[in-house]
Image (tube, rainbow, N blue to C red):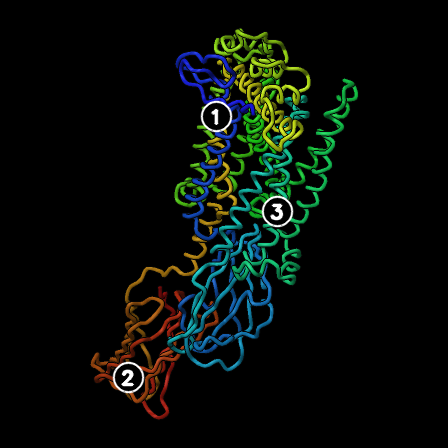
Amino acid sequence: MTATAPRPRPSRTGQPSRTGRPSPAGRPSPIRGRSPIRGPFAAVALLAALFSLVSGLLLAGAGPAAAHAALTGSDPQDGAVVATAPKEVTLTFSEAIAVGDGSIRVLDPSSKRADTGVEPKDLSDGSTVRYGVELLPGLPDGTYTVAWQAISADSHPISGAFTFSIGAPSETTVALPSEEVGGGAVGTVYGIARYIAYAGFILLVGGAAFVLGCWPRGATARPMQRLVVRGWITLTAATLAMLLLRNPYTGSGKFADAFDLDGLQAVLDTKPGAALVSRLLLLGAAALFIAVLFGTYARREDAVEKRDLTFGLAVGGGVVAAGIAATWAMSEHASTGIQAGIAMPVDVLHLLAVAAWLGGLVSLLVALYRTPDIGSEAVRRFSRVAFGSVLVLAATGIYQSWRQVGSWSALTGTRYGQLLIVKVALIALLLAVAWFSRRWTGRLTDAPVSAGASVASDPSVASEASASSVTSQASEASVASEASASSVTSQASGASVASEGAAEPGETADDVAPERAAQLARQRAALTATKKKRIRDADAERSGLRRSVLAEAAVAVVLLAVTTLLTSTEPGRTEEEAKGASAAATAPAASGPVNLSMPFDTGGQNGKGTVRIDIDPGRSGANELHVWIDGSDGKPMDVPELKVALTLEAQEIGPLPVAPDRLAEGHWSASNVQIPMAGEWKVDVTVRTSDIDQVTIDKTVKIG
């Protein structure tokens, strides 16, 4: 029995290579060297690792998504103590919100509902956004908790809670959720889906624009087709995930509620839900665009017909891309706040420019690694497209920054402003790297790509092919070199059987031939790809351009992560406005003891005197109240009855009665006098000097 040929060993310096030729000293053989597809895989692996690192750091520190709207006031206020139960509780917000049943709940000290349970009433007036719920009649004294949850106009969930007391504070057993709405595992997954949706949009729109506007021949390249199709799949999958997670994201925070049909129906009735459904419909039109681009357009040969088809695809694709971008603009930050009518189209332009720049950048990276025959003219076209996109981004970005920040203090003192500074720094870094890419682009030339040229430009290839004739068909050359000990014919199966010798017992030539033919096919493909890679790497300009484009793409990954966080963060302008409104509603006036002196005259005998009152510390909350009465002679004076009441007429609070206790002659005191809020309070004092002689005097004083 003739033994089969031994498997070739990896070549070392001075030893036979897998192709049967000596490998130059210190240089690996073509097969043993780096894989021809290691470059793109390494690039993709680098970007994936960078994406994971950035996402982990940013999402881990982000916490629940900050919202656009904010609670700016309430009645009763947080921590207020009211003498009698109010008929309703109202909440004021900085911007429009969406509410439903249970959006505002009032809980008594035992955690039972103290409101009527109906949907909150819209009490908004002009630019003031206010909602209220009616309370049950006859509520007992104690501390009540108001828990609220709503959806901001820019699609982000908001929630919070505060307390007020009737009569006097008491212990409460209300247990509120420890996590804010929009947080937890559901919030994290929803945030990742948002990032992936942006990435898919960039690959889909930017890849298609690169093919259509910069490199029409790329429509026939499989790597470019896969890039655009994967962008479409990514965006579609992320949109579906966001639609299903929308209900638990804005509600319970449980993954199981993603399949709640009632909750899904409620989502579809909201602006964000309608935007997600619209995006899915537009993605159906995008699928048709992709089919024409990589089908009819790629096969079209006639120049006039192809030009007409290019115009049609550009118009149709532009409309679809703008529509998809509008699903973000019409449901997020641009749709609310000042100048929304201008901000939404500006946001669409901003997103399209981002896609054209960053998506085209990824497309160029893939083309440089996977299709080294891309021409220099295509690269220069993209350079011009990128330059125009940067100009659009600069104009729209400046407007958006002014609209969302509005002041230097908001730029440096809010989370949104700080993220915006990071984004600007990343864009500056990206432009610096792009400057190097433009330099490499200017040096780029179209060298002939052929087997003969590869041999001339690469000494290792020339030395390896010295024993054989290198023709334009690299695969035939590899077969000839691998089968130097046997006769290679056009029938690969016959050649493999001859080189292998006789088959093993029980095997036939038909069993051996396919295996050997497949092995030869793999070797031919590997050697051909290796030679193409060496041709590509021999061009210093293209190698430099690949490195700079890879660096651009790495920075773009980080930039996209920061941009995604910006879209889910409360803009600096509204954050400052909300803080200002909240401070104006709750901040005490200059605190300090309040001292009053009021003369009185009951009209009877010894009915004249002066009442002196001290309220300490003279601000909202608990206070000590002291009352002194001096007679007309200036000496302490006792009276049969003394009553005090406090009224805040502006808020229709009071009168709140105070019953001071007598401490000494002409001196009364009351502790733990609860003043619910700051304001202009009217202090009423009733003095009775006999059974029939009585007078009530009052004075208004500012209590902080």
Residue type highlighted by circle 2: Asp
**Front: mark 3 or 1:** 3
The residue drawn where x is 66% and y is 51% is: 274
Residue 239 is marked as 3
Q: Earlier in the sequence, mark 2 or mark 1?
A: 1
Q: Earlier in the sequence, mark 3 or mark 1?
A: 3
Query: What residue is disc 1 on?
Result: 431
Residue type highlighted by circle 3: Thr
- Quadrant housing the C terminus: bottom left
Query: What is the secondary structure assignment of the residue under circle 3?
Result: helix
Query: What is the secondary structure assignment of the residue under circle 2?
Result: strand
Q: Earlier in the sequence, mark 2 or mark 3?
A: 3
Depth check: give the residue in front, 15 or 685.
Answer: 15
Asked if the residue at tag 3 contacts the one at tag 2, i.e. Cβ–Cβ closer than 8 Å, the answer is no
Image height of 230 relative to 31, above or below: below
How would you rate the neighbour count of disc 3 (Cα within 10 Å): few for under 14, some for 14-19, many for 20 or more?
many
Query: What residue is disc 2 on?
Result: 661
**At which x and y percent is residue 590?**
32, 59
**Front: mark 2 or 3:** 3
